Each structure stands twice: as C-alpha cells, then as structure tokens.
Image: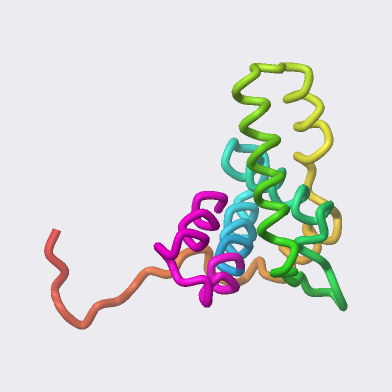
Amino acid sequence: MYGLAWLMDHSALPKSRAQEYYSSYVAGIFRSVRYGVAEAHGRAEMMEFNYLLEQKAVKREAGKYTVDFARMPAAIASLSKELLTIEATGDKARAEAWFSRYDKMPPELSDAMKTASKLPVDVWPNFSFKVME
C-alpha cells in the first residue's frame, strides 16, 4: 500500500481511484481475518488492521467499519516505517512488543465476522463454456 501511494504520487496510477484502492485493501483484511488469526497471514493482517484502527484510518461507526481516506496515507506510511524498521534492525524486543500489542482480534470485529459467517469465502465461477486447463 505504501508503494501504491508512491505510484499515485508519481502519476503512475490515478489519484482519483485512491478511495477504491484503500477500500479494497481494508476489504482484503476482512477477507483474510475470516480464516482466523492463528496462521501467519491472518495474524499479520490483524496487526495491520489494529494499527489502522489506532491511527483512526479505519473506524467503527454505528456497527459498521468505515475508512477515513484522509488519514489512510499517513497511517500506511507510519505502519510501513514501523514494520520495516523492526525488520531492518532485527530488534526482537520491539517485534515482540508489536505482536503483543496488535495481534488480537477485537471483540467488535469478531462479532462482525460472525454476522458474515454464512457468506461464501471465495467465489467459484461457473462458466458456460469449457475452461482449458
């Protein structure tokens, strides 16, 4: 997402579509955490989501999550800086503190996921023509 902002800032992608990009990113987080946070990808997405909540780039209002598009670029930049700094320095204590702080699913999100439990996880297209393999 940080790279996507760079591409928009350098006119490689249209800034007019920023809301679509950020909405799709947050929707992808919801999709990933539906599988749970016990495995690495779900856990990583959960930590990103919690950080975005803390930065108020994602908010829960009237029982629904919304994206604050004005806050999202700075939140993504800050998130990227933190994660890349932890990686670059190999600071184990900082990484453990990050995990401890952000890797739990908030009860509100858990409840929201329960309401979506009957929705299909993936869509499997049914083509009217033979698909070549």
Residue 122 at x, y percent in the picture: 47, 64
Question: Magenta residues, as a range?
Answer: 1-22
Q: Give the prevailing secondary structure in the magenta stretch.
A: helix
When asked about the image quadrant of residue 21, the answer is bottom right
76 above or below 44?
below
Looking at this view, name the residue that lies furthest to the front.
10
Q: Position of residue 68 (x, y in %)?
A: 75, 69
What's the residue at 81%, 54% (across, down)? 55
Where residue 94 sits, quadrant-wise, is top right
Would you say 97 lies left or right of 32 here? right
What is the x, y in percent for residue 45? 64, 47
Name the residue located 64 percent from the left edge and 17 percent from the top edge. 90
Against 14, is 44 above or below? above
Residue 17 is covered by the magenta coloring: yes
In front: 97, or 120? Answer: 97
* Image quarter in which the C terminus is found: bottom left
Query: In this rendering, would 39 be left or right of 50?
Result: left
Picture layout, residue 25 above or below residue 43:
below
Q: Is residue 71 left or right of residue 120?
A: right
Q: Residue at x 70, y 35 (%)?
A: 82
| Residue pictured at 44% horizontal, 65% vertical | 11
Residue 5 locus on image (x, y percent) = 55, 57
Which of the two residues, 99 or 42, is positioned nearer the viewer here? 99
